[in-house]
């Protein structure tokens, strides 16, 4: 839609509050770009925005409670600031629809996952009519990547290769909210990647609800591996990542493409969900533990230093102690560098919510604690193997929570491990987007420390992304030579954009 929003002399300010997965983060970048194209400006840290957009997730049971808590807190602010607007989008909006306005009548706009591009028009219409606007389409209005984007990182970008999902996992509500899988044409994807690289990015992450079924719409079973190989031909693109694949459709040609394409990083996020075959069957996960472990064996045979992360659900309906023990055994064998562990919570509208034998909360909690303890031990053991190695880090603009105290900056290793590193006396400081090679001197379960003791142990490689960081800082009247604390920490469940 092209209808203009900016109908007042003073630009309206906005803030986006994002909850959920990487797809939501990417959608928020689209929302930011869309709003700024229509005359909005980011709100300052100390100012009250004219517009607050909630980009929501519906995966967890407490998602609705979190949203309505935020909306309740914001009502007082809105009452004190006439003209302020509140919009709610994303998966929870697609699911709850009119319920949001009924429970929080001070909300001005509700829009779904299929019509992000309608937001500026709906905001304008709500102000003009002085009433809430609710528009939720059942089918995708326009592919999100055709919308304007305001990237939150000068050195890294998200690229959607598909939206929606054709799987029917009994615990997941996403397919009913984002619809059936729709694939972009390879040429459109590669053109977007090239545009990001031309703008200074050195890293991209390919996004999809199930990236390795990419190509199902145009009937090419090897489309994803071909896409990975094609990214290797893009000059200046140094790191390629992707998330998330599905074990049932993970094929050897993808492993070959990962191993043989130099800029595809040695990292794999492979959701396990459960190590019990009976539970996997109840989840409608069309693979079994032997298949899962077989994939990891093949990946590590071809890419020995690959780091593997996963998702695991504890306490799925009907899970016995024996089932849970099987999960522990698979986790022990898998040697995950990190696991995103969740206690099962029923989601209305999913088959699992109506299953018998829901597991008592105290049992789920006890199992969850055992799983976390096991994974923490494994992660610590795997991290310790890297002490003494040299790693080339892509420097980020997030110095970490203790960066101000330690003086360390932060980067990501090729396998995506988080590394806090110091700069030897007299050495040049990097910019976000530059690369540094440093020795790993200390390990922790989920991060590493690199403290070079001499300039000879520290190598800085300036990059085009660092130059892009300098340009962005100059455009915003900032200083482009020191990485600030804060910024976007990709992979966390929530962040603020705008």
Image (cartoon, rainbow, N blue to C red):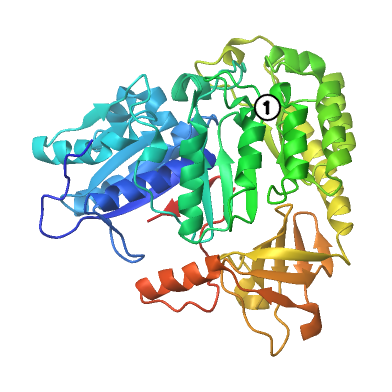
User: Residue at 57% across / 20% down in the picture?
Assistant: 216
Vertical comparison of 132 with 30: above or below = above
Where residue 465 sits, quadrant-wise, is bottom right
In the rendering, at what x and y percent does residue 72 appear?
Answer: 34, 42
The answer to whether one can see residue 19 in this image is no
Residue 333 shown left or right of residue 132 in the figure: right
Q: Looking at the figure, which quarter contains the C terminus?
A: bottom left
| In this rendering, position of residue 150 left or right of residue 409 | left
Residue 162 seen: yes
**Residue 483: image x %, image y %?**
55, 73
> Of 480 and 119, which appears nearest the observer?
480
Residue 163: x and y, percent?
49, 29
Instruction: Kindly state the secondary structure of the residue where label 1 is placed.
Output: loop
Q: Which residue is mark 1?
A: 246
Left or right of residue 350, residue 339 in this image: right
Tell me which corner region of the image, top left, top right, bottom left or bottom right, holds residue 94: top left
The quarter of the displayed image where residue 132 is located: top left
Q: Is residue 188 above or below residue 386?
A: above
* Above or below, comparing residue 98 to residue 380 in the picture: above
Q: Is the N terminus in the top left, top right, bottom left or bottom right quadrant?
A: top left
Q: What residue appears at the point 29 percent right and 40 percent down from the top-left corner?
A: 87
Q: Is residue 273 above or below residue 53?
A: above
């Amino acid at each position: 839609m092209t209808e203009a929003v900016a109908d007042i002399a003073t630009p309206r300010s906005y803030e986006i509050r994002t909850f959920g997965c990487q797809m939501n983060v990417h959608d928020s970048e689209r929302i930011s770009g869309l709003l700024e194209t229509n005359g909005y400006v980011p709100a300052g840290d100390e100012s009250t925005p004219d517009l607050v957009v909630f980009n929501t997730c519906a995966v967890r049971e407490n998602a609705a409670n979190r949203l309505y808590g935020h909306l309740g807190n914001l009502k007082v602010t809105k009452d004190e600031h006439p003209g302020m607007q509140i919009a709610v989008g994303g998966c929870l909006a697609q699911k709850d629809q009119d319920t949001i306005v009924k429970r929080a009548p001070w909300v001005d706009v509700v829009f779904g996952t299929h019509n992000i591009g309608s937001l500026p028009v709906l905001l304008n219409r709500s102000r003009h009519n002085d009433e809430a606007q609710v528009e939720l389409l059942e089918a995708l209005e326009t592919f999100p990547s055709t919308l304007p984007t305001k990237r939150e990182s000068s050195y890294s970008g998200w690229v959607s290769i598909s939206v929606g999902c054709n799987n029917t996992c009994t615990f997941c509500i996403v397919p009913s909210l984002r619809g059936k899988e729709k694939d972009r044409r390879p040429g459109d994807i590669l053109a977007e990647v090239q545009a990001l690289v031309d703008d200074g990015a050195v890293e991209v992450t390919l996004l999809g609800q199930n990236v390795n079924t990419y190509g199902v719409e145009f009937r090419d079973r090897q489309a994803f591996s071909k896409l990975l190989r094609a990214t290797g031909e893009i000059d200046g693109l140094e790191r390629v990542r992707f998330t998330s694949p599905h074990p049932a459709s993970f094929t050897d040609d993808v492993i070959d493409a990962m191993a043989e394409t130099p800029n595809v990083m040695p990292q794999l996020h492979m959701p396990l969900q459960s190590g019990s075959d009976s539970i996997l069957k109840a989840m409608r996960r069309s693979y079994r533990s032997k298949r899962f472990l077989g994939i990891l064996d093949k990946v590590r045979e071809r890419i020995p230093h690959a780091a593997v992360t996963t998702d695991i659900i504890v306490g799925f309906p009907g899970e016995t102690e024996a089932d849970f023990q099987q999960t522990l055994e698979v986790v022990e064998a898998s040697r995950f560098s990190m696991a995103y562990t969740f206690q099962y919570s029923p989601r209305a509208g999913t088959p699992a919510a109506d299953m018998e034998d829901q597991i008592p909360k105290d049992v789920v909690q006890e199992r969850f604690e055992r799983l976390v303890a096991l994974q923490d031990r494994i992660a610590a053991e795997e991290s310790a193997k890297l002490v003494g190695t040299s790693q080339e880090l892509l420097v980020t603009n997030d110095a970490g929570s203790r960066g101000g105290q330690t003086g360390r900056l932060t980067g990501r290793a090729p396998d995506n491990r988080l590394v806090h590193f110091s700069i030897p006396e007299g050495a040049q400081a990097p910019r976000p987007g530059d690369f540094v090679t440093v020795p790993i001197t200390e390990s922790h379960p989920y991060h590493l420390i690199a403290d070079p003791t001499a300039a000879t142990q520290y190598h800085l490689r300036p990059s085009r992304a660092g130059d892009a960081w300098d340009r962005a800082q100059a455009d915003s009247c900032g200083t482009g030579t020191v990485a600030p604390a804060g910024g976007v920490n990709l992979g966390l469940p929530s962040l603020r954009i705008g």
